[in-house]
Image (spheres, helix red, strand yellow):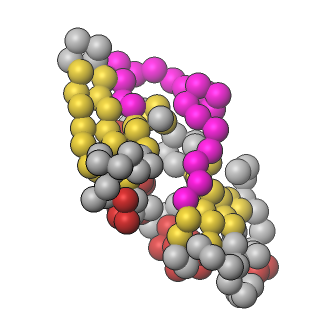
Amino acid sequence: MVRVTDLDASLKFYCDILGLKEVRRKDVESGRFSLIFLTANEDEASSAESNAPELELTYNWDPEPYDTGRNFGHLAYVVDDIYATCQHIQDSGVVINRPPRDGRMAFVKSPDNISIELLQKGDALEPKEPWASMENTGTW
């Protein structure tokens, strides 16, 4: 579960940029919050039936600032092509905080400052430019 402060920005990041899909949503008027459940494409069909991994976004309707310890630590996702994924993320205006210099791992941050680790599926890809010589940006 990750607490989010701007639901539209978070859905754009997790769904449009990272490629997750919203599989269900629950609005709780009495508690003034929404729960939005996201899953990876390959887990969409089995998310409810077989308890496949899901990311729960919790959106509290009344604004509340969260520090990093209050919202989460970091998430990790396996991707088919770390370079193509990072290029798409960068082209979408998201900073690559730790580039995939090794062809295996990168870090970005969500709109709520959550660290997202991206891991190459299978073996690491051969190092290549511009990633191999790209410096870290900020924290991850």
Can you tell which quarter of the image residue 24 is in?
A: top left
Q: Is residue 87 left or right of residue 4?
A: right
Residue drawn at x 58%, y 42% as measured from the top left: 113
Q: Is residue 82 left or right of residue 40?
A: right
> Does residue 21 appear anywhere in the picture?
no
**Residue 103 screen position, x and y as percent:** 70, 78
Judging depth in this view, the residue of 87 and 72 nearest the camera is 72
The residue stretch that appears in magenta:
58-77
Q: Is residue 41 left or right of residue 53?
A: left
Q: Is residue 138 left or right of residue 28?
A: right
**Residue 123 screen position, x and y as percent:** 68, 79
Residue drawn at x 58%, y 43% as measured from the top left: 114
Is 110 placed above or below 30 here? below
**Residue 52 screen position, x and y as percent:** 40, 50
Can you tell which quarter of the image residue 19 is in?
A: bottom left
**Farthest residue in the front direction?**
50
Residue drawn at x 48%, y 36% as measured from the top left: 2
Can you tell which quarter of the image residue 82 is in?
A: bottom right
Is 94 placed above or below 130 here? above
Is 109 placed above or below 79 here? above
**Farthest residue in the top direction?**
30
**Residue 1 screen position, x and y as percent:** 47, 35
- Give the number of callouts: 0
Is 130 placed above or below 111 here? below
Residue drawn at x 63%, y 32% as measured from the top left: 68
Judging depth in this view, the residue of 33 and 96 nearest the camera is 33
Within the magenta stretch, is there residue 42? no
> Does residue 138 appear anywhere in the picture?
yes
